[in-house]
Amino acid sequence: MHQRNGFTLVELLIYSVIFAGVSLTLVYFLSTFFRVSGYQASSSEVANQANFILGKIQNEIATSSLVVVNDTGNDEVDDAVGTPRSKLLLKTRNETTGDASDPESPVLIYKNGSNVVLKRGNGAETALNNSSVAVTNLAFTKVSTPPGKDVVVIDLTLQYQSPNAVDRISRDFTLGVSRAQAAAFDSSLSPNGSGYSLGTGAAKWASLFLSGGATIDGALALTNGNTNTTNNSITFLKQGTLVVNPNANIPANTTTQFFVSSPTYPELQGIQAGDRVFLTPPAGSTAASRLEVGISFIGARTLADSIEINLRNTTGAAIFAGSHNWGYLVIR
């Protein structure tokens, strides 16, 4: 009887098939594991970079005093509201002169190549992302939401930079951000259209300080402290100097009316009959710069685009009334 050593050919074939099946299964699971791990790593890196970029932009917007969105980089020109633009410009509260020597403002954020860059004042550009991701899209849309603060919608697209094409995932991110603090302006302040108010009846501003003139189309209501008692609203106010030249003889002991009117005096356009008028007669140091001796100012009234002035000769002889400068104040 012979003793058998080793495996038969059939056994070897069976073992080979089993080994191949197990090996293929193991390779499949390993490849799947590494593919999923690579995707998760890529996705996590893209998400981390996006969180940092958007968080940085959000903080800059929230602490700014003025938001400008355009394609030119001009911090004084705001493009059409509601249209995506490539550049975001932010003015800061601690801005000094606003010129090219300012190290703080404006803050400029935009896409440069494959990076999101931030440039503060006259400083150098700083990339907000690293080389592991590429920025394929960056757009800013300014949305006006009266009476609230303007909102900037940020659209950001990042792509993971991997030598393996399968791992080069791309993700889109969108974030809306509004300012969080009061504004400090270094240019003209204009509303986004007509009809907006500065403050309300319930939420009033405090003191108003102006270094120039004020033009008010509506009524000016004067109140008495906390009693809120309206004191006859002022709707029209005009003052200045008029050249009054009767160029006529006023008979003795007679009151005569003289008129100053538009268009001879364009500054009188708009006054109406019944407006309150206050006149200051000339009182110069020389005879030529004051009312003639014996001529008295009796009173005045307003007519449409004109003022009637009443002068009286208090002497027993006719007096010629000449040209003089009169101060006037008209209130409605």
Image (cartoon, rainbow, N blue to C red):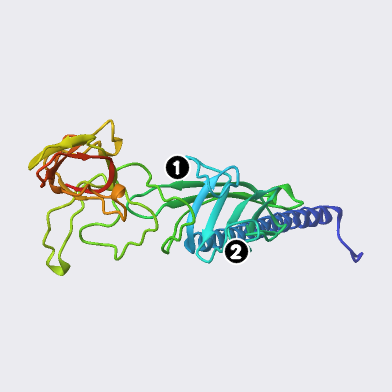
User: Farthest top residue?
Assistant: 263
Q: Provide the secondary structure element on which disc 1 rests.
A: loop
Q: Nearer the viewer, residue 101 or 42?
A: 101
Q: On the picture, is 47 further left or further right than 328? A: right
Task: In the rendered view, tell whether residue 182 sits above or below residue 288.
Answer: below
Expressed as whole percent of the image width and height from the top left, the position of residue 1 reads 91, 65
Q: Residue at x 17, y 68 (%)?
A: 225
Q: How many marks?
A: 2
Expressed as whole percent of the image width and height from the top left, the position of residue 48 reads 60, 62
State the image quarter where residue 184 is shown.
bottom left
Residue assigned mark 2: 104
Task: In the rendered view, tell whether residue 215 sits above or below residue 105.
Answer: above
Residue type, label 1? Val
User: Farthest left residue?
Assistant: 253
Disc 1 to disc 2, C-alpha distance? 26 Å
Residue type, label 2? Glu
User: Farthest bottom residue?
Assistant: 226
Sequence-wise first label, 1 or 2: 1
Q: Nearer the viewer, residue 263 or 33?
A: 263
Q: On the picture, is 97 further left or further right than 254? A: right
Q: Nearer the viewer, residue 158 or 316?
A: 316
Expressed as whole percent of the image width and height from the top left, the position of residue 220 reads 21, 52
Packing grade of label 2 (10 A; few <14, some 14-19, many >=20) is some
Instruction: Give yes or no for contact between labels 1 and 2 (Cβ–Cβ under 8 Å).
Output: no
Q: On the picture, is 134 further left or further right than 246? A: right
Q: On the picture, is 188 further left or further right than 40? A: left
Q: Provide the secondary structure element on which disc 2 rests.
A: loop
Expressed as whole percent of the image width and height from the top left, the position of residue 146 reads 34, 50
Q: Nearer the viewer, residue 47 or 320?
A: 320
Residue assigned mark 1: 81
Packing grade of label 1 (10 A; few <14, some 14-19, many >=20) is some
Q: Closer to the camera: disc 1 or disc 2?
A: 2
